[in-house]
Image (cartoon, grey):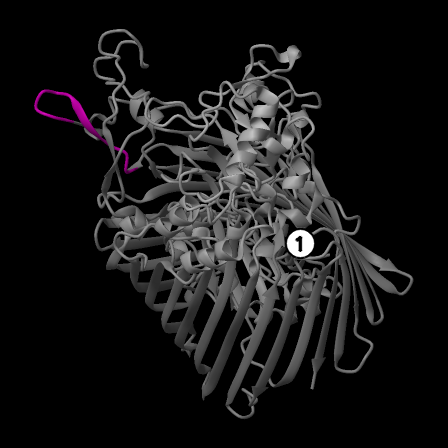
Amino acid sequence: MKLKPLIGCLALAGLGTHAIANDNLSVAEADEAVERIRVTGSSIKRTTLEGELPITVFTREDINAAGITSGEQLLMQLNIAGNGMDNMASNEGITTAENRGNSGNSGANLRGQGADATLVLLNGRRLAPHGLKGRSVDLNSIPFAALDRVEILRDGASAVYGTDAIGGVINFITRRDYTGAQVSGFADITEAGAGHIYRGNVLFGVGDFDQDGWNAFATLTAKRNLGIRGTQRDFTYSFREDRGLSPDTRGTPFATIFNQNSDTAPGLIGGGLLDPDPANEGALMAAINILALPGAEGCAAGGDFMDRFDPNLYPWSATSKYACAWEYARHRMLQSPLESLDFIGRVSFNLGDGHEMFFELSAAHVESRKSFEAYQISSSTLENAQYNPSTWYPSTGANYDRIYNALGEYFGYDDLNYGAPIAYRWRCMECGPRTFDTDTTSYRALLAFEGMIADYDYTVGFSRSENTSKTTLVDGYYYLDQLQSLLGSGTLDPFASPGQQSQAALDGLAAASAAGLKLYKGTTTLTQLDAVVSGDLGLELPGGFIQAAVGTDLRREEYKFDGSDLEPGKTVPLAPFDDQNALDKVSRNIKAVFAEVYLPLLDNLDLTLAGRYDHYSGFGSTTNPKVSLKYQPVEQVMVRAAYSTGFKVPNFNQLFEGVRAEANTVDTWFDPAICPDGQVSDTPGCESIQPDILRGGKIDLQPEESTQKSIGVVLVPVDNFNISIDWWEIERTNTIRTATQTVLLENYDAFQDNFIRDASGQITLIDGRFINSGGTLTRGIELDANLFGELAGGSWRVRLNGNYLQSFKTKALDTLPYSENLVGQFVYNNNLPIKWKHTLNFSYTHGDFMHSLTQIYRHGYEGAIFARIASGAHTPENWDQRVSSYTTYNYSMTYRGLENTLITLGIKNLFDQDPPFSSHNMDSAAGSAWEPRVADPRGRAYTLLVEYTF
């Protein structure tokens, strides 16, 4: 047995079932088959079997067998991927300016470092990031059907690639040439309905590169993902106060009346009505729905997904005994609908003597849609949004009297203010779901030369890529003045059941619609010139010849962000405008040089040194080294270790976002320079203050810095079994974050300059913009084990790939200690640190058939806990903070027995496992009763891939 081929195959193996390709070859055959290539994470061309880099590879066969159709789906099954708001389900929450980049964008997030700290490459070179936020590459724009393989470097690589390569590198590698024609079709149909996926692909190529001296091929792929709304999956049921989930849902499709009591504008029920129920004597009812009164039709008569608002289950709303509730969160999208069309073409010319020139063009058009529940309208959010009898049906007043009499018959008429307006909270179902589309167009054009001069490999490339993304209102948003007119006149009736609005109301809504209004548009552009030369230096060490690579990387990055088309003086409530951050084109230039040296110190000891110097116009330079070691004391054992530093530069928004002073509505600010209590109190100097808050970009931000460490062992005790275990650590410092109230007040000595004072010393403004402060510490262990053999004339394989997260800690300042370990704890919005994730696969190949059964496991964690439960003030009947683990099984069968035809049948989520219940606050994170950062909402699905080659 010879270890070297096995170690190399293991190092390049991933979760796929075909990744170790050479295990059935003899040692001589394997060595002869090895080609020297440039592997992701290294600039030196070498054999793929040299194994010192921890790389996971998915081949095209692996991807097809798993029914994976996008980079997002691949990342969801990848154990080293973080669980952040990076997919089209977990970013379905209400969009804020900070998160607008998630609209239509799927990002890659390795080791929980974030999509903006994971480098994504296409054929080894960078792409322009998504246009809206300019932070990360959109995986939806990758020509996925054209892939040959995906290489994932599980290590920091700033010493090779520069910025963003902190969590790791994902390199999507397409075919290099193709001759012939091929068509394929794919369908992924859910059993529960909705969320289906369809894909069609055409591939065509002409010219034999070796014989004709050229090759040209192109592939075109169309894909359509249908959306899923929460109302289409029962596990999203959110009236679960018995388990701690109880959103305030009194904005109902048939309006709920609220108290309004002031000297200038008393409402119909004033400060509330006394409950005549003797068991509730003296209780004041402040929220009443006439459908919920004794003897009335009941809440269900007001529309679908309405239910009684039970104050026994909602103890903080005892004044709502006669209110109704509506499941607003279920009306959000669980998975965005998406349509895409992508293209990649390549023309290669054999220039002779080992030289090649090629031109590559990739382009994509992606349309995605976000959709939220319909408008909730109340007297506190719209000035004229009151059921005002003076303007609503003034000729008869019959409907006003209906409400008045329903209340009077039960509560008595004495406390009613007849003729006063009615304050209400209402869900305008006829307004339709709030919906906006994000339309993204991207391309990259690359001209490159590769070959050998003397004994040295070289590659030179010039590329330009661009991503333009525009978000437009589609439905459910209305101009405020026209909406108020419809409400004030009574044309739009809050006390009509859904489907009962007049034609005049429907026509008025159509006229008031803001559909077609552009919210914002962003464009990123990347122009790059790169060159690498590598080869033997002619110097020999005891283990072999020294190899080296040198290169340069010259880039220009540009960004432009346009605001909305909204006319001056117009208002569209709740539309996520971001006009204050509109930017004229900004740019920066990057100049980098890098080098790498491979030193075979002994036959069993290799050392690789790498370093890179980057200079950014605007804030200077950074140098980052990397040292990696491979030691093989015996044939059955290999030890590998690496140390490197990395960096992530501020993005254009963090530098140039519009600076503005925002009104401060928080009453817990105080002057930390003179307050001895450290909180707002009656102590002199601790009085509450409310200075304005400065928001926006900050041009003097510095890059984040990181250090990466790893050590691993690869064992091959017998020919048919191998295992690798790698420990890793990533520490980030000088992290870029918003200056929060807690950080500023508790660390006043470090942030005195953020408290801006007038001549008398009074705080007049607080600088809450981005700061470089503190850091994160993440540690984990990755495991990959393979057992294979032969059975009944076929071959079988069992693979276990897992990731154990040991530590995830943060700190606000470099001088402070790290927080408690957050692994296994619920975290809003950012990465959810799950302790253990694994994929266990069994595959069996016999003749023309290949079967694959995969278990995907995600460990449970401690869920969110609301303050009222944590304080012990209320314990729900079935309360359990623990969110259960999530396990699904996928099966596929591939058949190659028909000439020129490949057929793959599959079942995803074989046992139709629902996502585990989660009781987090749905106003602060996506998901109604489930966690989209962990689970898949589609349920059991059936897949079919048919591929025919002409």
Q: Which residue of the protein is positioned furthest toward the right in this rendering?
A: 792
Q: How many marks?
A: 1
Q: Is residue 393 above or below residue 249?
A: below
Q: Nearer the viewer, residue 297 or 200?
A: 297
* Quadrant containing the N terminus in the rendered view: bottom right
Q: Nearer the viewer, residue 625 or 503?
A: 503
Q: Residue 181, how many percent across, how many down?
A: 64, 85
18 within the magenta span: no
Q: Nearer the viewer, residue 651 or 483?
A: 483
Q: Is residue 924 visible?
A: no
Q: Residue at x 69, y 60 (%)?
A: 20
763 within the magenta span: yes
Q: Nearer the viewer, residue 118 or 939?
A: 939
Residue 132 occupies quadrant = bottom left
Residue 356 occupies quadrant = bottom left
Q: Residue 105, how many percent across, how many down?
A: 48, 56
Q: Residue 544, how many percent across, how many down?
A: 51, 60
Secondary structure of the residue carrying tag 1 is loop
Q: Which residues are magenta?
A: 757-770
Q: Which residue of the protein is positioned furthest toward the top in this rendering?
A: 683
Q: Is residue 722 visible?
A: yes
Residue under circle 1?
Answer: 15
Q: Which residue of the protein is positioned furthest toward the bottom in this rendering?
A: 212
Q: Is residue 192 above or below residue 921?
A: below
Amino acid type, label 1: Leu
Q: Residues within 10 Å of mark 1 (few under 14, many from 20)?
A: many
* Quadrant containing the C terminus in the rendered view: bottom right
Q: Is residue 449 above or below residue 807?
A: below
Q: Which residue of the protein is positioned furthest toward the left in this rendering?
A: 759
